[in-house]
Amino acid sequence: MKDTTRHHDGTVTYWSVYEQSWQRRQAHVPDRELAAMSEKERKRVLHHLENHPRLVGDAHGPWAV
């Protein structure tokens, strides 16, 4: 399994088993992607996305959701 990266800007990068490519998300990871992660990794990703102090409404960059 490839490593998920939690970034200082509040985004996460993970390997999509469905797209077969790296995906970088700011606010939401699709449920099917979360289901493909281990329980430990899923909890880490959700905690990071829910608790990272970032600007609300920042929709810049190719990973903005």
Image: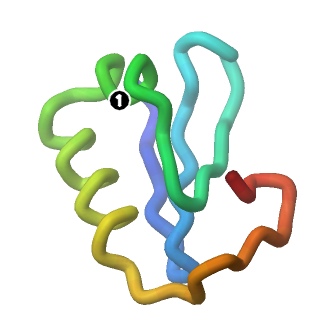
Q: Residues within 10 Å of mark 1 (few under 14, many from 20)?
A: some
Q: Which residue is mark 1?
A: 34
Q: Residue at x 39, y 63 (%)?
A: 49
Q: Tell me which corner region of the image, top left, top right, bottom left or bottom right, holds residue 63.
A: bottom right
Q: Residue at x 29, y 75 (%)?
A: 51
Q: Label 1 sits on what residue type? A: Leu
Badge 1 marks a residue whose secondary structure is: helix
Q: Residue at x 38, y 79 (%)?
A: 52
Q: Position of residue 30 (x, y in %)?
A: 48, 30
Q: Position of residue 54 (x, y in %)?
A: 52, 86
Q: Is residue 46 left or right of residue 13?
A: left
Q: Quadrant of the N terminus?
A: top left
Q: Position of residue 42 (x, y in %)?
A: 25, 40
Return the residue nearer the eye: 37 or 58: 58
Q: Is residue 30 left or right of residue 43?
A: right
Eyeballing the image, is 12 above or below 40? below
Eyeballing the image, is 41 above or below 46? above
Q: Residue furthest front?
A: 57
Q: Is residue 2 left or right of residue 50?
A: right
Q: Residue furthest top?
A: 18
Q: Residue at x 71, y 78 (%)?
A: 58
Q: Tell me which corner region of the image, top left, top right, bottom left or bottom right, holds residue 11.
A: bottom right
Return the residue nearer the eye: 23 or 56: 56
Return the residue nearer the eye: 36 or 30: 30
Eyeballing the image, is 9 above or below 13? below
